[in-house]
Image: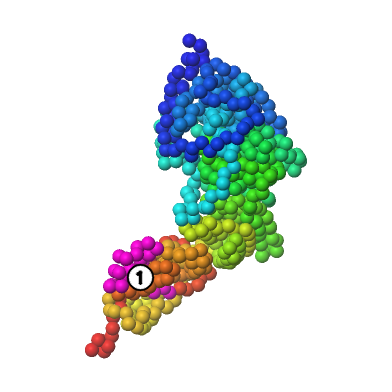
Amino acid sequence: MSATSRWRTPIAAAVLAGCAVLLAGIGAQGGERGVQKLSVPIMKSSELKPGMKGYGLSVFKGTKPEKFEVEILDVLERAFPKHDMILIRVKHPVTDKAHIIAGMSGSPIYINDKLIGALAYGWSFTKEPIAGVTPIEWMLQEMVEPKPEKQNAGVPARPDSAVRRQKGGLALGAVKIDAVTAERLARLRPLAIPMCASGLVGLPPKALKKIRARFAKRGLTLAEGGAGSSRHKIGVDSLVPGGPIGVSLMRGDISLTGIGTITHREGNRLVAFGHPMMLTGQEVAYPITTAYIHGVLPSQYSSFKFGSPSSSVGVLTQDRMPAIAGTIGKKCPMIDVSLSISNPTNGRTEKMKVQMIRSRNWSPMLLWYACGQLVLNEGVADSSFAVDYQLDMEFEKHGKLHLEGIDMAWGGYSISEPEYALYSLMQNSFEPMRPTRIDVRLKAIHKRIDATIQRVWLDQLEVQPGKEVKLHMQVNPYGGKPREIVFPIKVPPHLDEGKYDLVVAGGGSWAVEQPTPPADSVRDIFTQLKRRYRPTTAVAVLKLPSVGVGFKGKLYRQLPSSVFGTLVSSSSAGLSTFQDGIHFTHKTKWYLTGGSQRLKIIVKQSAEEGK
């Protein structure tokens, strides 16, 4: 028995079992969508036999593809639903040291000068450069440019990629694999996509950890890179099989670009990667760029290419299981983002300009990332401080939205309010949102203004209808002495006798949120964002025994039981219920934290009134 056969039998069986489990949750991606006549001959996986030799193409430095030797180890039939996976061994001076490299995704593989597929899958901690190849006959389905589809705004897209890495294991689609099982299955996975990010060098460790963790949840690995390759003039001529390709999420003063390899090009259409980037189907429009590879970083866990994007040359139009595909020469609509942060103590203002993709799932997080890079220019490592923010957003068809307030840069990195506002709009259930411009203006307060609510009390437990009682709130400002806030609570004149709950918290707590009807339109979401309490507002809610209903954009309070029952039974769609309450607010100079607290207030008429 040859060395190849001895290796092939147990490993192929184990990997085949792994593929079956890992990919069981993913259905076949559509049917045959038709394949154009190709300029290169292909060989199907059914024609391959162990021991056949050939070559692959990939770039290890610069832009020129290099050949590497390939030997067919075996074909795992139906490793994917309806499709095979090809196992190969690779030989090249670089892969002899670094083994299979993240960024090689899409490297075309040829046997007898016929294209068989793209190097796309690999394993960690391997002793040999062995990889999985996605068959070309499956990938070519994506070569046909898709017809535009109307976005289904009624079902919010998942915030995380369907193909994602879990802590200690893997998850594909609905199938979750724990760490033990994943190890047993040899940790088969698509090669990581090096997400070359500018601005990472020199970041505080806690900030860098937070950034990497958020992108890791989306299945992307951040690698230090440049914002662009201005030293190297790279045109569309570099977009050849085996050449580098970038898929840009953000460009400008901050850059985020995924680097991979082109498998095949026909005219202005190309396919790459041999696996999905984020599995977003054809509801995708991301810029395709040329790219420059600075080198390869060998690693025992997972070696990777590090590179930089160059010119934007087209649009990614497909992001599916077998490959990504795009069109050269098209322009991609982007969001123009301007950011600035001013420091009143030294009069300095830092500004940034970026463009980022329009995406229900990605645009909010990319805005968070950009704000974080800006805040770090003014912050102190691992030190929280407050900022005044002004946020202006402009949308096609929906006009402009202005929001302002105070936010905290916890740990000296980023703020949450701009991301929350954009997420609320992009994930609406009515129609696609197409932001064209976002302007974020920050003023660093450069001190912590957060204060924890320690306790609350009333100056009297009993109060008559129509009278006031004073609410006392003790707060502990960060680094300061306890302070007391006092504001009046006026009981409605017609409130019945009895015991009532009084809930007290800062405006950022869900416990004192204003009741809002289910949004009936994008305009309703605009209104709700403007009406939100700010965290610097102290809020007390006197809970009433009656129930209200939100319906078709309006609130109906203290409804008679007959009306309430009719509404609930006749139309539950677009209807919400809430406990009635009277809201009292008081503006403070602190960012209030510490959760909510609850008091009892007794409403009782005087003896004379009772007679």
Q: Position of residue 405 (x, y in %)?
A: 56, 66
Apparent side of residue 162 relative to residue 92 in the rendered image (left or right): left
State the residue position of label 1: 548
Residue 563 in the magenta stretch? The answer is: yes
Crowd around label 1: few <14 · some 14–19 · many ≥20 (10 Å): many
User: What residue is rendered at 56% in x and 46% in y?
Assistant: 147
| Placement of 201 over or under 582, stated as above or below | above
In this orientation, which residue lies closer to the viewer: 83 or 524? 83
In this orientation, which residue lies closer to the viewer: 405 or 134? 134
In this orientation, which residue lies closer to the viewer: 306 or 74? 74
Q: Quick one: SS at disc 1?
A: strand
User: What residue is rendered at 47% in x and 73% in y?
Assistant: 586
| Placement of 407 over or under 304, stated as above or below | below
Residue 91 shows up from this direction: no
Q: Position of residue 544 (x, y in %)?
A: 33, 73
Q: Position of residue 187 (x, y in %)?
A: 47, 31
Residue 430 shows up from this direction: yes
Which region shows up in magenta? 561-584
| Placement of 76 over or under 174, stated as above or below | above
Q: Position of residue 578 (x, y in %)?
A: 36, 67
Q: Amino acid at mark 1?
A: Gly
Apparent side of residue 611 relative to residue 443 in the rendered image (left or right): left
Image quadrant in which you'd find residue 596? bottom left
Residue that lies at the very extreme toward the top in this rendered image = 1
User: What residue is rendered at 28% in x and 72% in y?
Assistant: 561
Residue 259 in the magenta stretch? The answer is: no
Apparent side of residue 208 relative to residue 268 in the rendered image (left or right): left
Q: Quadrant of the C terminus?
A: bottom left
Image quadrant in which you'd find residue 316? top right
- Specify how the rendered protein is coloured: rainbow
